[in-house]
Image: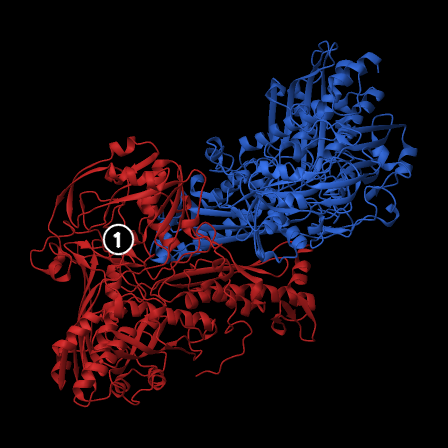
Chain colours: A red, B blue
Amino acid sequence: MKRAQAYRVVGQAEPRCDGAEKVTGKAIYTVDVKLPGMAHGKILRSPYAHARLRRVDASKAEALSGIFAVITRDDQRRLGMFGAAYKDQTIVAVDKVRYAGDPVAAVAAVDEATAEEALAAIEVDYEELPVVTTLDEALAPGAPLVHDASVAGGELMGQHYEAPREFSGTNLCYRFSYAKGEVEEGFAASDHIFEHTFTFPRVQHFSMEPHATVADVEGERMTLWAGTQEPFTLREHLSDIFHLPLNKIRVIVPYVGGGYGGKLAVKTEPLAAALSWKAKRPVRLAHTIEESFRTVTRHPARVKIKTGVSKDGQLIARQCLIHMETGAYADAGPRVTQKAGYRCFGPYRLAHMKTDAYTVYSNTVPAGAYRGFGTLQVSWAYESQMDIIAAALGIDPLEFRLKNLLKKGELYTPGDTPVDCDLKAGLLRAAKNIGWNGKKQPNRGQGLAVCMKDGGGTYKVSSAAVKMNADGSVVLLTGTVEIGQGARTALSQVVAEELGLPFDDVTVARLDTDVTPYDVNTNASSSTVVMGLAVQRASQDLKKQLLRQAAKVFNVRPEQLTLSDGKVHGPKGQSLSFEALMQKIFLSKAGEMIGRGAYQDVKSSKAALGSPTTFWEISWGAAEVEVNRDTGQIKLLKYVSLADVGKAIHPVLCEGQDEGGVMNAIGHSLLEEMVYKDGQLLNPNLVDYRVPTFAHVPKEFESILVEDQNGPGPFGAKGTGEGGLLPVAAAIANALYRATGLRLYDLPLTPEKVWRGLQSGK
Amino acid sequence: MKRAQAYRVVGQAEPRCDGAEKVTGKAIYTVDVKLPGMAHGKILRSPYAHARLRRVDASKAEALSGIFAVITRDDQRRLGMFGAAYKDQTIVAVDKVRYAGDPVAAVAAVDEATAEEALAAIEVDYEELPVVTTLDEALAPGAPLVHDASVAGGELMGQHYEAPREFSGTNLCYRFSYAKGEVEEGFAASDHIFEHTFTFPRVQHFSMEPHATVADVEGERMTLWAGTQEPFTLREHLSDIFHLPLNKIRVIVPYVGGGYGGKLAVKTEPLAAALSWKAKRPVRLAHTIEESFRTVTRHPARVKIKTGVSKDGQLIARQCLIHMETGAYADAGPRVTQKAGYRCFGPYRLAHMKTDAYTVYSNTVPAGAYRGFGTLQVSWAYESQMDIIAAALGIDPLEFRLKNLLKKGELYTPGDTPVDCDLKAGLLRAAKNIGWNGKKQPNRGQGLAVCMKDGGGTYKVSSAAVKMNADGSVVLLTGTVEIGQGARTALSQVVAEELGLPFDDVTVARLDTDVTPYDVNTNASSSTVVMGLAVQRASQDLKKQLLRQAAKVFNVRPEQLTLSDGKVHGPKGQSLSFEALMQKIFLSKAGEMIGRGAYQDVKSSKAALGSPTTFWEISWGAAEVEVNRDTGQIKLLKYVSLADVGKAIHPVLCEGQDEGGVMNAIGHSLLEEMVYKDGQLLNPNLVDYRVPTFAHVPKEFESILVEDQNGPGPFGAKGTGEGGLLPVAAAIANALYRATGLRLYDLPLTPEKVWRGLQSGK
């Protein structure tokens, strides 16, 4: 562990720069944007999961008073198709609808009630088609096809995605395969082979703020206020859809009430834009909670995992067969599949590995990116299986893991970045803090899990600018979206630290693609490292200019100067405030100095793996549960989460990310599941679909930040935010097993499942 | 004359980039900004021209329903004083009011009517004081003092302004003196000495959009939407007034409906901000026309000009005594005075010159910056006197001018930039086109005038950024305010020309001090040259990056490449679109490249003159009038205007500036005058105060752009915009004289004055 340097601002729990606005209710989210003459949009959604569109007639709706525009498939004809990975989506359905909720038409009206009325006046004749709403149905030979023809491939962050030709006539749309060593030989050399299948349910991202867009299209100019995690990428999609050059499109991002991946890529923003274009006025299109449930979900998945071990508990070979159900449209499905496929081996030493991961269409809500990009689905499987194997071999699960964990510096796969963290130390700490192997109480059990994912994204273009004003105060321009994670605060700390400024002297400008330096997106726990480096470099660029100017004033060399407390200090104790320095440069309270910085990593590999990872995001979890044998309810008594953050720029925010991740995971571990029947989603609301509340917070809840100062980000930071949720499901399931002997393979671990399991004595 | 180069975009009358928005009424001006919860502000103004404030009691107003805030002098105590040159202003009057219209209190209410009601409920006890509303009254010994104590000096664009100590106890507040040669010796050596006094009336700027601000102050953050010509400088003023760092203040500039100098410096923006701060909600404070009349005017002036000539018509010496009446607060008065003083000698060769120019307070509306900064007042005098002298010597006014005009390369004053234009050629052209010395018709006459001012400002800090998007389209970031002059269009042309792009591929981002690169202000005919160079340099910086990248692709040297039609062309005919080039750099439709450029000229001279001028703005005017001897009405039949623009980036916009300048000047030449009686302004409205209409456009109206490609700006451009209006008044007065023998010394040349003059046989 490197010794921690003394920082003034970094490492401090500075007040969130968006805190006051948010707690006073003054913060503007997209839903709060009001423009003069603004109309309100509503979407007509298909009641059928799969149907041919015989007729869509909006003439009665168009004739109603208070209606400014109706969008039907006739309008789609002038527009391009879209989608994160494939161009398989249209703003409204054209030939057929592919899931219950698929947009069929949309209306812009004087108010929401009038818009709803108009929706009822749109006449649609559907011809129902057979549906596939599970992996089994979708993969069955001769299954009804969600997409009749093969979909057009597309570019996503420097990689080309395309369905293999042999998938024609099936619901498969993407395959990722990877192998190292000779997995069959590995299995042949193993003493024991374990094979299990785990499933991960269909779960909603559930951001507090549903999707919303306010669009203002005026002639050839398009301005969008959107709750998006990738305004620049959204702009690029809009450019393709509307055949407009990028300089005519402006995306402004107000505060965003949560993203979790559900606000990546394109959702209904182009539909809002089309409504505004046709209505010739601004249009607000804000989803209800129910509509967001019908817009994007996480990927339901089935993971078949086969592992070969030696009798002394050495992992030898692992093979995974993964199916990710991406719903009616691919969205980011192929990339999520790719990542799930690559990350399914866990943080363990394996001489032989092989994976085949498939993306599968079905007649359900499209599944897109989610916090961890597929890791969640596979870590649930591999960390459950680790305990199964340990039990079978009679080895303590902690010991079994310690025996197999990769060491710092070891390779996960050849060509990737070596492991950058002491996995064993972290696991031992988690075990110690949960009180591993302490006194066993009835119906109580403890479980461990450790997960690893490549972090920071494999395609990164980030840039930033830091402007010093005439009084020495600073404005930071960054394209990172503030989705609640506190990025503005942490990035301001980087600036303040680098420039020797008080934290309060830095503010962050609003995000507007016209003026904010480019950033590809806010995802993959990347902002602190990737944008952080761009921001740090911009600050250093500004610092260099300040030092050069100050060196002239003091008649010394720049290297003899230091910055602190908003001042430049010379070698002989002389000092000059930034304000005074600016006055010397501009001879007035005027002018500014700008530093710029960028981070770019776009090495395209023809192989699907992309670049070596920026860093490894590693997280450990230890859970203690109590099981009520009468009700089947699992009570999470205690949870210890460790996150390797390298250096916590803002420890409280890091803990917030980590704790939030755990809470998020308690949802899919114990509670959440979107229930389908006959192609219909039954519980798209907060009465029937339960998300964790404060009542689910474990009484003892510890979040530990591992700070080895060894990250590639500013001041040794690594990214965090996705790690915390990865070990939770397996840690709880392992604890359940140790409490009751019951092993479950399908999330969520509901009381019903537990009770039935206990009853059947499995 | 340099040979004009062939340009593709520069020199073309491209469609105005703000045209469609403006003609369709979609363009957003400050008055159109609406924010949720926005209150409406109104100002209580003093009915007295000069009075001590005994009591200001707002308690009844505060108790009314629908009132969110009342600002009185009690609130001023926490705030700093302000003013363009001196800190002599407060947001509302504190101890006394100094002109009829001086803000005494302000209210923010649920609507304007409620605010008006509340104003009536504010109780104010005034103790009337004697007033001074003319230069004579203000300068009389023992005159009542507008400011009891001497006002605090201040910084304005790199210069310090301060009232000389000996002005204490007078209404004088600034003096500018300059001398070259020995003026007394010059007069002694002259054969004839002429001495005349000319006056220039009090005239309003009359922008189509009165002053308006929407302020939103939230805790320590202040956001203003303001119709201002200098958002960055306004931000600096606000920082001083509210003791807030610059990073907490954001000024956004929507479209501005005319400036003419009247929207420079600080007007009622801080009052709007104070209302918002106290009301804890956004506040809109929009002036009526009448209120803008009571906010700022041009400077009424008295110019005494004494000129010595030889008997053969050679100018030898000139001395000027100038008094500029700046009203109740100095605003930019000292700087206007300085410029009037420096520019009073005209474009003539004078061995001896001396000037003393004074700024004088009075109990009238404050006078501030105006198109030409004092040149108008003095050119009216010197170009009238040129004709008087010519007539006295029996020399043709054209000949007399030709004999004395400075040659290209000659010095106006030592240390300044040599004259950069052929003054004689321009004058001959104006004379020719007006039909000088043609057949004389009864009651018709022709007049000439030629004027010169240092242009581009003496303190300039401008910066710009040019961002190329992934598809090769470009966004320009510039702090120049679009006040109707077409700056966004012309600057976009500079970008398109430099980068080899179609005009339409460039858009200009909205102006927002948080994100737009710094620019000191939009004034002094400076934008095309000063900001133009910053923009050109930013484009060249981007170009260099593009060439470097393309050189790698083609495997050639960057110098072998050219840019045109949105493509890079190689030496062997190969070409690559910018979009394809960006794709090669970023491997996706992603990323951007940014060029940056700046122009800085802040050489502070301890002398008042500042730096050598960036360029000389030169304009020639020739008028033909017909005088109705029965009514005294002057009809302007024909007008020829020549403007030396170096290179017209956008010829139609240049002509628009030139023609607009002439029309503007027809106002103060023939029509406009603010009439005061007993300290009260009698005609602050468009019924009683007449501005020129289309009926005043001369039937024959020619605007000629002189293009010698010799300006310092991009592609040889010089600044334009202020020049056109300078010769108008003198050219008309000289024509009046040649038509009737009547010489008038006081503007405007109203029918009454002309009729009286003709009757009295003067």
Residue B731 picture location, percent across and down: 72, 23
Image side of residue A17 versus residue A697, left or right = right
Residue A647 picture location, percent across and down: 45, 75
Q: Chain of mark 1?
A: A
Residue A361 visible in the shown view = no
Image point (48%, 74%), residue name: A715
Is the residue B636 above or below the residue B258 in the image?
Answer: above
Residue B633 picture location, percent across and down: 71, 15
- The residue lying toward the viewer, choosing from B732 and A107, is A107
Could you tell me how many numbered marks the image carries?
A: 1
Of helix, strand and loop, which one carries label 1?
loop
Q: In the image as oriented, which residue stretches furthest toward the left?
A: A142
Image point (27%, 45%), residue name: A91
Q: In the image as oriented, which residue stretches furthest toward the right?
A: B188
Q: Quadrant of the C terminus of chain B?
A: top right
Tell me where residue A55 sits by quadrant: top left
Is the residue A284 above or below the residue A210 in the image?
Answer: above
- The residue lying toward the viewer, choosing from A607 and B434, is A607
- The residue lying toward the viewer, choosing from A230 and B61, is B61
Image side of residue A544 versus residue B366, left or right = left
Is the residue A753 above or below the residue B708 in the image?
Answer: below
Q: Quadrant of the N terminus of chain B?
A: top right
Residue A520 visible in the shown view = yes
The 10 Å Cα crowd at callout 1, few under 14, some 14 to 19, many 20 or more, is many
Is the residue B229 above or below the residue A324 in the image?
Answer: above
Q: Amino acid at mark 1?
A: Arg
Tell me where residue A325 sits by quadrant: bottom left
Residue A19 picture location, percent across and down: 49, 62
Q: Which residue is mark 1?
A: A294
